[in-house]
Image (cartoon, rainbow, N blue to C red):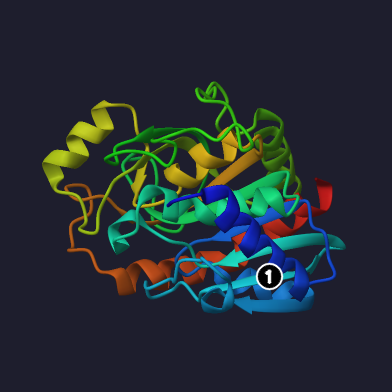
Amino acid sequence: MDDLYSLVMESVKYISSKTTLTPKIGMILGSGLGDLVKNIMNQEIIPYEEIPNFPKSTVVGHEGCLITGRLQGAEVLVMQGRFHFFEGYSMKEVAYPIYVMKQLGIETLIITNACGGINTSFKPGDLMIINDFINLMPGNPLIGLNDERFGPRFPDMTEPYNLRLITLAKSVAEKLQVPYQEGVYAGFMGPYYETAAEIRMIGKHGADAVGMSTVPETIAANYLGMNVLGISCITNMATGIQKEKHSHERVVETANKASEQLCVWLERIVQEI
């Protein structure tokens, strides 16, 4: 994307003209996990297609709206649906909304996704706090000339998921008696579900779950100086572990079922941030 800063600022100008709020908390809702928006008060909804330079969501289960409002009294900016590399977007386009969020004043980013479980102690419907990632995608959004107005040439990834936020999420889960797992998320290019051989390889690399998103956004958010919390919904067990064949419809169905518990958890986390 040429002159990324100018494109981002054009998007920011438009979004700012459509809302009176100045949220510090941003959220990305993954496949089937969009129910949280029902609890957002004083909503201002901006379809992605109306925002200058914004990509368009093409995946079932991703509504394609940017929403501002109040969640448990906190001002939030929520992406109801994300963009994926497998849709044909460049990595910079996939991460483009994160650059926009930063310029809108977002300091904390909560990323959710639907993914496959590799850790055999997991089961479909489990919620997993992400404590690290493995990038198995062919590239990342920081490749190319660096614009120091956004961040440093070589950003640190010692703590891609903020330890303070992880501790907070665990504390809230225990208070609410929300069961959770914790593990490493591997970002796979897609758009096919991985082979059994690939899952064996990814598991040996140390991944507990695998999906087709989240990693580009996490990289960009850390580069931009945001604090990131990642939570996955394990919608299926990965190939070779799960006995039946995969389908996106079943993924969305499982995510929808887990969404209620995730919403309660996220609402309290936002309240305590």
The residue under the point 37% across, 58% down is: 84
When asked about the image quadrant of residue 150, the answer is top right
Q: Is residue 126 left or right of residue 19?
A: left
Q: Residue furthest right?
A: 73
Q: Position of residue 245 (x, y in %)?
A: 17, 63
Residue closest to the eye, 190 or 120: 190
Residue neighbourhood size for the residue with mark 1, other residues' Cα within 10 Å, grouped as few (<14), some (14–19), many (≥20): some
Where is residue 230, by image quadrant? top right
Kind of residue indicated by mark 1: Tyr
Above or below residue 199? Residue 78 is below
Quick one: 253 or 270, which is closer to the camera?
Answer: 270
Residue, disc 1: 14
Q: Can you give x and y, in whole percent of width and height, for residue 107 in the image?
A: 73, 44
Q: Left or right? Give the position of 163 relative to 153.
A: right
- Res. 43 visible in picture: yes
Is any part of residue 233 visible from this angle?
A: no
Q: Residue at x 74, y 45 (%)?
A: 172
Q: Residue 81: x and y, percent?
A: 50, 67
